[in-house]
Image (cartoon, rainbow, N blue to C red):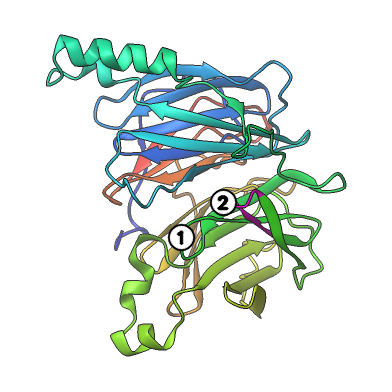
């Protein structure tokens, strides 16, 4: 990603349906695309085949606008062919999970017929590849979000020493921590901002090897139970540190450049020590920018995207070599079926 300023996006095969405010999760060579404000269907995009496959639909009673989907982390089985997705929030809060097995497994020439049949039976017998209620260890349904919480446009990250903590940032200026092992909230706090926090940028500072840039001495000084996050929205830039031992937050302000401050609903990805922002909206379409975490500095670029979009979603490929931009709204705020890729 050293030449972001000169790279251009390549058009990939169009999405099966137009999407805006969608959610996307990476699983090996697949981008799992999970619905949007007007679309309940979920698809898998295979990055090597440049093809899509239908996975399932959300239940009829679920309204997705502004929802969030994260991949739960199983530290005991990192190479598993199955993963669990958590979908929650949105305008009308829902909390669902999906146990996912690749819909492309039947296409794998290296899998014999018996294994393919086993895979099909497993999917049917264990409710794989469908959204079902999130339940606790006693089969009781779990709902993430309090009655008064506004989860439209919220953002969430998985973290904690055991990857069991769900960090949620949401309107108007709230941050909460939900323990996925205990099935309950363990912390609520207020973000130091005057801006409404929704449809914003929220990333883990430790993603994609960011902490590997630190010296061993610096790492030793840090507790293993500290999680660092970055948040940007309008004029608000925050470095957020959570101390798992003491269950508290520390907030530090970060600069926001004038070209980015007016906008929200941009796509974003974090790689190495930079955050890339694409598009956005505030009565007009936004610019593209790069924030250097190490240098604490912004660089703005015009028209990296072939055409600016709002409400699109950005995601990195498995090898961190490519940025994919999925869907979005055009200048008339109409959902598009664009899929773009940049190296």
Residue 6 in percent (x, y) is at 33, 56
Does residue 272 appear to the left or right of 66 in the view shown? left
Does residue 133 appear to the left or right of 192 in the view shown? left
Residue 181's disc is 2
Identity of the residue furthest to the front in this view: 138
Residue 9's disc is none
Q: Nearer the viewer, residue 25 or 253?
A: 25
Q: Which residues are magenta?
A: 177-183
Q: Is residue 106 above or below residue 281?
A: above
Residue 295 in percent (x, y) is at 44, 80
Which residue position holds label 1? 162
Few, some or many residues within 10 Å of mark 2 (<14, 14–19, 20+): few
- Tell whether label 1 touches label 2 (CB within 8 Å): yes
Q: Is residue 338 above or below residue 225?
A: above
Identity of the residue furthest to the right in this view: 148
Name the residue located 63 percent from the left edge and 36 percent from the top edge.
138
How far apart, in angstroms, are the residues tagged by discs 2 and 1? Answer: 10 Å
Q: Quick check: can you spot residue 182?
A: yes
Q: Quick check: can you spot residue 264?
A: no
What is the secondary structure assignment of the residue under circle 1?
loop
């Amino acid at each position: 990603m050293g030449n972001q300023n000169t790279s251009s996006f390549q058009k990939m095969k169009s999405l099966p349906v137009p999407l805006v405010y969608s959610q996307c999760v990476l699983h090996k060579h697949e981008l799992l695309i999970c619905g949007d404000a007007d679309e309940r269907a979920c698809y898998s995009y295979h990055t090597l085949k440049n093809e899509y496959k239908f996975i399932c639909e959300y239940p009829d009673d679920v309204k997705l606008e502004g929802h969030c989907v994260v991949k739960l982390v199983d530290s005991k089985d990192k190479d598993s062919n199955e993963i669990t997705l958590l979908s929650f929030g949105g305008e009308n809060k829902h909390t669902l999970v999906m146990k996912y097995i690749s819909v492309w497994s039947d296409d794998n020439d290296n899998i014999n017929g018996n294994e393919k049949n086993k895979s099909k039976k497993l999917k049917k017998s264990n409710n794989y590849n469908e959204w079902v209620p999130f339940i606790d260890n006693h089969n009781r349904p779990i709902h993430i979000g309090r009655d008064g919480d506004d989860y439209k446009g919220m953002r969430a990250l998985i973290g904690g020493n055991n990857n069991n903590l769900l960090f949620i940032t949401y309107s108007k200026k709230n941050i909460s921590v939900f323990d996925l092992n205990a099935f309950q909230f363990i912390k609520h706090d207020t973000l130091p901002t005057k801006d409404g926090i929704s449809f914003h940028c929220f990333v883990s500072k430790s993603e994609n090897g960011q902490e590997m840039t630190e010296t061993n001495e610096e790492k030793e000084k840090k507790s293993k139970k500290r999680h660092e996050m970055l948040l940007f929205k309008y004029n608000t830039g925050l470095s957020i540190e959570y101390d798992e031992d003491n269950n508290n937050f520390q907030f530090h302000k970060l600069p926001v450049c004038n070209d980015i401050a007016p906008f929200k609903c941009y796509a974003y990805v974090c790689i190495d020590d930079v955050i890339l922002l694409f598009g956005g909206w505030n009565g007009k379409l936004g610019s593209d920018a790069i924030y250097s975490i190490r240098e604490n500095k912004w660089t703005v670029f015009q028209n990296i995207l072939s055409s600016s979009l709002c409400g699109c979603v950005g995601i990195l490929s498995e090898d961190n070599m490519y940025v994919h931009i999925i869907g979005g709204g055009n200048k008339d705020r109409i959902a598009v079926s664009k899929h773009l890729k940049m190296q």
